[in-house]
């Protein structure tokens, strides 16, 4: 399987020059057409753990547009691992993601939103495993043949993979910024950062206090780690005209594709902070492009 090392791309912005800072982007979006960004980082050790477990299939979770499910489906196809994807919401939406999952051979099961909410409840998961034995007898014969990966790949193995992102970031960078959903990616880079580096998460979700707790639980950040809560643009997967226009203009100008769910909010936040002189002169800022943009028309014969 070919996962490329993400290139570091310097970008020249007028606003960066004015502020006297250097701005670079770690292009994790370019590491693979479908197993890209932080979703590959979070899957790496989960896939190794699966191989070592002797189990027969992977069970994991996601919404209709889930980047994690796309990465899992691609990994399943490339590595020949049977995958079961549990989808949130029982209404059938046909979108390019769903078509891709099916083309990769992922087995799908939809849960109502109420059931889906129980996805971390042990009793529910044991029932769900029984149900998978009935639904997919060609894959597994017993519930304990399933290897579970939580939504987004956000467990300890996922954080371990994200720790490795820092190997691709220059040691003299002073500020490392990343979009935050569960905060696992931020937790990983925070663990691996050195004492002169600041790691900054931009929350794509509305609601304070939720994120710091999850990051603390997963990776115990130091004081140099913080999360900004003012750039959610209405909440998860919500956007505005301003954000859409920003993504479009930025993508066109720098040839770095952005989408409004994750990376658009991160880059918007960085430019906004620059214009407010947030970073001291001489700062070396690295933005982690966590992927999330797929060309589903690409052929599947990887
Ligand atoms: C999932 C995802 C994130 C969020 O990662 P967390 O580790 O959950 O904070 C950020 N960017 C993209 C493109 C993603 O797909």
Image: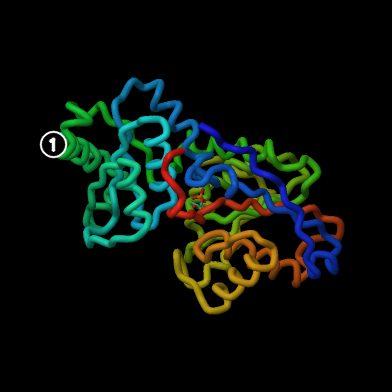
Query: What color scheme is it?
Result: rainbow
Q: Secondary structure at mark 1?
A: helix
Frontmost residue, 192 versus 100: 100
| In this view, 241 is above or below 100 | below
Q: Quadrant of residue 57?
A: top left
Q: Position of residue 97 (x, y in %)?
A: 37, 55
Q: Would you say 163 lies left or right of 102 here?
A: right
Frontmost residue, 251 versus 266: 251
Q: Would you say 4 lies left or right of 150 here?
A: right
- Which residue shows up at 40% across the image and 53% down it? 66
| In this view, 126 is above or below 231 | above
- Which residue shows up at 38% across the image and 47% down it? 69
- Residue topped by disc 1: 134
Q: Would you say 135 lies left or right of 60 here?
A: left
- Which residue shows up at 44% across the image and 32% down it? 46
- Which residue shows up at 50% across the image and 63% down it? 261
Q: Residues within 10 Å of mark 1 (few under 14, many from 20)?
A: some
Residue furthest to the left in view is 134
Q: Position of residue 61 (x, y in %)?
A: 33, 46
| In this view, 257 is above or below 173 | below
Frontmost residue, 80 versus 195: 80
Disc 1 under 8 Å from ligand 1? The reply is no
Q: Position of residue 222 (x, y in %)?
A: 65, 44
Q: Quadrant of residue 85?
A: top left
Q: Position of residue 94 (x, y in %)?
A: 29, 60
Q: How many marks?
A: 1
Q: Would you say 235 lies left or right of 73 here?
A: right
Residue furthest to the bottom in view is 241
Frontmost residue, 226 versus 57: 57
């Amino acid at each position: 399987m070919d996962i490329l090392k993400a290139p570091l791309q310097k970008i020249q912005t007028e606003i960066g020059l004015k502020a006297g800072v250097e701005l670079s982007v770690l292009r994790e979006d370019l590491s693979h057409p479908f197993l890209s960004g932080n979703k590959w980082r979070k899957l790496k050790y989960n896939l190794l753990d699966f191989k070592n477990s002797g189990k027969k299939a992977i069970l994991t979770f996601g919404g209709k547009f889930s980047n994690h499910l796309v990465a899992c489906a691609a990994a399943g196809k490339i590595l020949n691992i049977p995958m079961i994807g549990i989808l949130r919401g029982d209404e059938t939406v046909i979108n390019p993601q769903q078509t891709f999952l099916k083309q990769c051979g992922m087995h799908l099961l939809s849960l109502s939103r109420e059931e889906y909410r129980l996805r971390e409840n042990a009793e529910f998961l044991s029932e769900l495993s029984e149900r998978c034995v009935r639904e997919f007898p060609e894959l597994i014969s017993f519930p304990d043949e399933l290897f579970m990966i939580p939504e987004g790949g956000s467990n300890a193995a996922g954080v371990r993979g994200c720790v490795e992102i820092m190997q691709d970031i220059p040691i003299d960078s002073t500020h490392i910024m990343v979009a935050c959903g569960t905060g696992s990616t931020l937790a990983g880079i925070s663990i691996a950062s050195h004492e002169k580096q600041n790691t900054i998460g931009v929350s794509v979700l509305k609601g304070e206090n939720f994120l710091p707790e999850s990051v603390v639980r997963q990776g115990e950040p130091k004081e140099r780690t913080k999360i900004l809560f003012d750039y959610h643009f209405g909440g998860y997967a919500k956007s505005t005209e301003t954000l859409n226009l920003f993504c479009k203009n930025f993508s066109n100008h720098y040839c770095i594709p952005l989408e409004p769910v994750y990376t658009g909010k991160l880059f918007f936040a960085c430019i906004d902070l620059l214009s407010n002189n947030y970073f001291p002169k001489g700062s070396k800022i690295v933005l982690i492009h966590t992927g999330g943009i797929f060309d589903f028309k690409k052929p599947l014969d990887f």
